[in-house]
Image: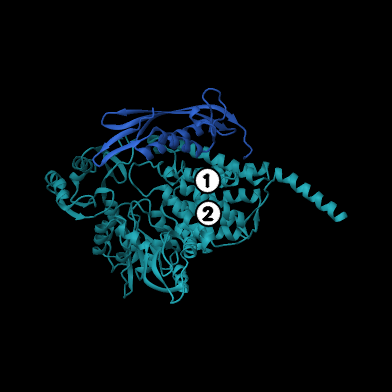
Amino acid sequence: MDTPMSEQKNTGTIAIKPQVLFTLALNAAKNTYGVIGIASRYTGYDTTIRDPHRGLEIKITPREGQAPSVAVDIHVIIEYGVRIPSVVSSLQHQISYGIEHGTGYSVEDVKVHVASVRVSNGK
Amino acid sequence: MPSQATSTQIMTQNDDTAQKTLRLTLDGRRFKKLFKAGYLWLKQQEQTVNAYNVYPVPDGDTGTNMMHTMRAAWEAIANMDERSIGLVAKAISAGALRGSRGNSGIILSQLWRGVARSLEGKDVADAQDIAQAFRSATKTAYAGISSPVEGTILTVSRETADSAEQLAQQTHDLDALLDGVVRASFESAQRTPNLLKILKDAGVIDSGGYGFFVILDGMRRFVNGETIESEVVVAATRAMTGNAATDEEAGYGYDVQYLIYARSGAQLNVNDVRAKIEAMGECPLVMGDGEVIKVHVHVPDPGVPISYGASLGSLRDVVVEDMQAQSEEFLPGQVKPADAVTEHADEVDLALVAVSAGEGITRVFHDVGARAIVPGGQTMNPSVQDILDAIKHAKAKEVIVLPNNGNIILTARQACEMSEIPARVVPTRTIPQGIAASIAFNFLQDMTNNLEAMNAAASRTTTCEITTATRDVTLNGVEVRDGQVIGLIDDKLACAGDDVGVVLLNTLEIGGAASRELITAFYGNGLDEAHASALLEPVKEKYPDAALEVYPGLQPHYHFVVGLE
């Protein structure tokens, strides 16, 4: 999982560690309207600060002659009152845009699990 | 001790209310802060907004255009310390109007104009006033567009206004109102594909509507106590120099370098100098000893570090360079300001002003009689102010403006409305249309006759453009992969392929080149003459009856722009 994906360019090798994609996806989720945080995939509790790895998984599959393909699995907590399908589709777009724009990999799949809905009083 | 007792009471009261502060009114100062948050958040999300582009072409992008419009508005109020919300809104409206770029920018500036109208004469605004401002914004924006399309920023602004009015009935708390309108604008933006088929086909939501939501969302994030990244940087640099122009938005500023030689008998303190210079600007570099110190810094005003240096000792080897001018020279495909600004000594009755993209196309426009050129076009849409400057620059009693791009027509119309010199627009959507219109221009005729002839010439021209797709999309039944070559006919996707030559031939065939007399081809800045003529050879063979003219257009992004007449 931690071996960097590498790509041979005529000037040398570009290697992107999975952690980079993780950060891109996490940041995209944080910037998405209506998403409050990442939930643990086991307990459903908010794990945004403690360990977002528990609710955000990224699989990278190398492909012959093409940019690697990426599948994202993310468990989120959503703000009470927003239309969940809208937020989810926006989240999918933000994540795939963030990763594709940043790394050039192609995001094939973003699975969003809505773990819970929380009433927030504007923090 | 009665006075002490009262003061304690007041304090506890304050503590109580602090826990659930309701913000009931909004004044100019806070409005300015909110506006800034909206602008900075949009700036940060610019690329995300751009990604919702329907066409996979490197066009003047919505996010960028909206950001520039907001930036111009922000610059208009950056130095204001005004309590009256009406006056702040008025300044925003004026700034946005002059700085607006692209269709989305124009609509955004109309929205701010509506807000300003509604808040005029008010010092503070309550929930009702804000709801009215939203409504007025929507009305002004709808009124400014000749044929409003649903499923765009207009719809999003209208539905947001609906929600603002409803919320204002229920609450007086402005923060709650803001929360509600952000939610409404988000959902409205998500619904746009249901209203506009082209969005659904492309699998995106409307970028302008999304941009509208992003601005409001930035305000909400600010109210919730989030720091929007670049805000810190901007505030910090300003505090250091006490100069508002330090705003990183002001551009690149000046690169200042010099040597300070200590006056005889005196010693220089390197650490003092370093501390002072570091506070002045970016990329500071201070090296030396007690005798001589080398200083390098990027600042908006070169006078500041120079007079500071001169106060310490004698200056040598002073170098001051305008980095903005330098960076402009390096931007590919941009017309250098010098080209656009040739002074006209004489005044004429009627003149042409054309928006151009690419050096070669600018030259052609000069040749066919344009008096002033507005640099811009595909990637960087010009602002209203840019066009106003060009109109003035043409030195004529009346002016005809050729926008030469669908996304600039509204900007041009706006500029003509604001212009002191009477000016009209021939709504040319492409460069070949603009050139056809320019050729139809007759300076001996009056405005009306010219407009008629030019409109007719433009509408006779079919435009084929060959470019590279910037993402995957399926539109009009054509499937496109990122990086493929695509052909557009009058801005509509016609075909795709892997080879420029093949796509060129296919596009011309679909565009009906067989029945045309004149094929004018402009090749882009990625091709050289030999390469271009090799690609055009099959075109010549296939259409022997048509006259083929080839020019180096040197336009960015587009391999070929071809006019069929």
Q: What residue is shown at x 26% (from left), y 46% (from top)?
A: B465
- Give neighbour class at mark 1: few <14, some 14-19, many 20+ (Cα, 10 Å): many
Name chain A's colour.
blue
- Relative image position of residue A113 (x, y in whole percent): 50, 26
Q: What residue is shown at x 62% (from left), y 33% (from top)?
A: A119
Q: Nearer the viewer, residue B208 or A50?
A: A50
Drawn side of residue B546 relative to residue B349, left or right: left
Q: Chain of mark 2?
A: B
Q: What residue is shown at x 35% (from left), y 63% (from top)?
A: B325
Q: Nearer the viewer, residue B215 or B279?
A: B279
Residue type for callout 2: Trp
Farthest residue, direction front? B265
- Give neighbour class at mark 2: few <14, some 14-19, many 20+ (Cα, 10 Å): many
Label 2 and label 1: CA atoms lie apart by 11 Å
Q: In which quadrant is the C terminus of chain A drawn?
A: top right
Residue B140 shows in the view: no
In this figure, which residue is indicated by the disc labeled 2? B112
The answer to whether residue B223 is above or below residue B418 is above
Comes first in the chain, label 2 or label 1: 2
Drawn side of residue B331 relative to residue B223, left or right: left
Q: Nearer the viewer, residue B141 or B267?
A: B267
Residue B85 lies in what quarter of the image? bottom right
Secondary structure state at the residue bearing disc 2: helix
Q: Are marks 2 and 1 in contact (CB under 8 Å)?
A: no
Q: Which chain is cyan?
A: B
In this figure, which residue is indicated by the disc labeled 1? B157
- Relative image position of residue B392 (x, y in whole percent): 38, 68
Residue type for callout 1: Ser
Q: Nearer the viewer, residue B390 or A65?
A: A65
